[in-house]
Image (spheres, rainbow, N blue to C red):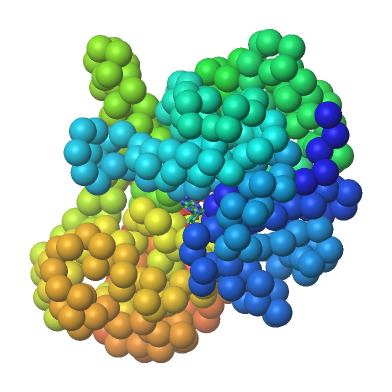
Amino acid sequence: MKITKICCIGAGYVGGPTMAVIAQKCPHIQVTVVDLNEQRIKDWNDPNTENIPIYEPGLSEIVAEARGRNLFFSTEVEKAIDEAQVIFISVNTPTKTYGKGKGMAADLKYIELCARQIAKVAKQNKIVVEKSTLPVRTAEAIKSILDNTGNGVQFQILSNPEFLAEGTAVTDLLNPDRILIGGDTTPEGEEAINALVDVYANWVSKDKILTTNVWSSELSKLTANAFLAQRISSINAMSELCEKTGADVNEVAKAIGMDSRIGPKFLKASVGFGGSCFQKDILNLVYIAKSYGLNEVADYWEQVIIMNDHQKRRFSNKIVQTLYNTVADKKITFLGWAFKKDTNDTRESAAIYVADDLINEQAKIAVYDPKVSRNKMLSDLDYLETRTGEENSNALTILDDPYEACKEAHAIAILTEWDEFTTYDWQKIYDSMHKPAFLFDGRNILNAKELESIGFIYRGIGS
Ligand code: NAD
Ligand code: UDX
């Protein structure tokens, strides 16, 4: 089977960049990305591709090249499903906020809606690809909905999880470590797997395209995120011990990372990991383990989240303690609000929780982030429901200029590792601040010695 038409449901951080790269690399395939969110589709279609709704280095250029040629963004979900041979489901699968599994399980309502819509519309056989991150055995539920509510056509369900990281989505998609495709072990299943392999083989070498059964593929995604997050919580746990013992966590990370069995990546101590995936996927894993009665497995992985929450809280506590146990009415400037550099995404960003803690202590927070909008920051805080929207907007000032943001601050806290922060005129910033001038580097990106020689009281993580 030769794929010529692909539809992707969900034009978010995964659907948008993934489909843009498929379209760029496969000019012979028509790719249509659909979403219920009209504004989001309008933004993807903005004549100026600098205004597309997701900021990722290199993405606007790819969209400019492929959009209108073989890449389309649309709200006509049913039409796109009807025309496509392959339908990717890339909708959100957030943590449930209600009912059974509240706060733990993945909310699959958007996935089920997609399955029902595909079943209703499809008049020919289709391959349905799980691109969203899903609990292991979700393909069974999707298959049951498709077979029981469909028009008698055949569906093959594939699991093809996405491993891109935000901020590097384009390079990750162009040069993936691997592509994982899980499917049925029947001849029809294998045919569907091969059809999808052929799409990726347009730019990914075959030895990097791994095929497995569906359940291994679904579970590998949750496992990969759990292992990655576990490394961060492990090094963050050590950072606290370093602070007590005179060890330096950067030196410890370097020393252990040179062991080829451990490796150097993902060992950067920080204010805590954020992003839409790690916490959600580990909570989901914990929930799945518990549902099978595997309590030790569940407790083991839950500790990764407990440690991360502790690390975020420890950072805000340290600010309060260092500022003589009171931050009431003091201006504290945040450099960075995004959950990591090179993205405008703020989901689960440590900055939100640190700000919330400090506002509880009646601090005045000023924020500068090169890519995050004012509305986004305020809605992140409002979402916590700690206080009214009006109280949040009184406590948070958002500025477009980092020097303005730091003026007359009692302390600066680095929450995101944006490169530009390392290039600032720190003497100028120091001169404009209240003294003593405190600097809390939640990302260990600045040079402690240089800052201390200017006069800052510098506190990094884990030293
Ligand atoms: P997102 O919220 O940015 O995008 C999801 C989009 O789906 C939204 O625009 C929403 O309007 C749309 N949608 C929801 N239901 C729909 C429906 N029935 N019909 C049409 N559109 C619908 O989410 P995301 O960050 O792109 O994540 C999507 C999935 O990919 C999640 O399962 C996530 O765990 C997984 N994932 C995310 C990343 C990441 O870095 N963000 C990486 C790997 C995997
Ligand atoms: C993650 C996975 O890396 C990716 O494979 C998956 O598809 C989606 O989830 P993402 O959340 O976009 O990607 O970014 P990632 O680079 O993993 O960073 C997650 C968080 O961990 C960020 O807040 C980052 O600052 C933090 N982090 C990362 C650290 O604190 N230390 C590190 O060493 C690495």
* Residue at the front extreme of this rendering: 151
Image-quadrant location for residue 231: top left
> Compared to 374, does 260 lie above or below?
above
Is 178 displayed left or right of 378 in the figure?
A: right
Residue 417, x across and y down, in percent: 50, 60
Q: Is residue 39 visible?
A: yes
- Please state the total of marks drawn on the protein image: 0
Is 351 displayed left or right of 418 in the figure?
A: left
Q: Quadrant of the N terminus?
A: top right
Residue 99, x across and y down, in percent: 19, 38
| Camera-nearest residue between 62 and 372 | 62
Residue 94, x across and y down, in percent: 37, 45
> Compared to 187, does 126 lie above or below?
below
Q: Is residue 222 visible?
A: no
Residue at 60%, 27% in the rendered image: 152
> Compared to 269, does 150 lie above or below?
above
Residue at 32%, 65% in the rendered image: 380
Image-quadrant location for residue 309: top left
Residue at 64%, 47% in the rendered image: 81
| Camera-nearest residue between 402 and 105 | 105
Residue 305, x across and y down, in percent: 30, 37
Is 325 displayed left or right of 10 in the figure?
A: left
Image-quadrant location for residue 338: bottom left
| Camera-nearest residue between 438 and 165 | 165
Residue at 30%, 62% in the rendered image: 352
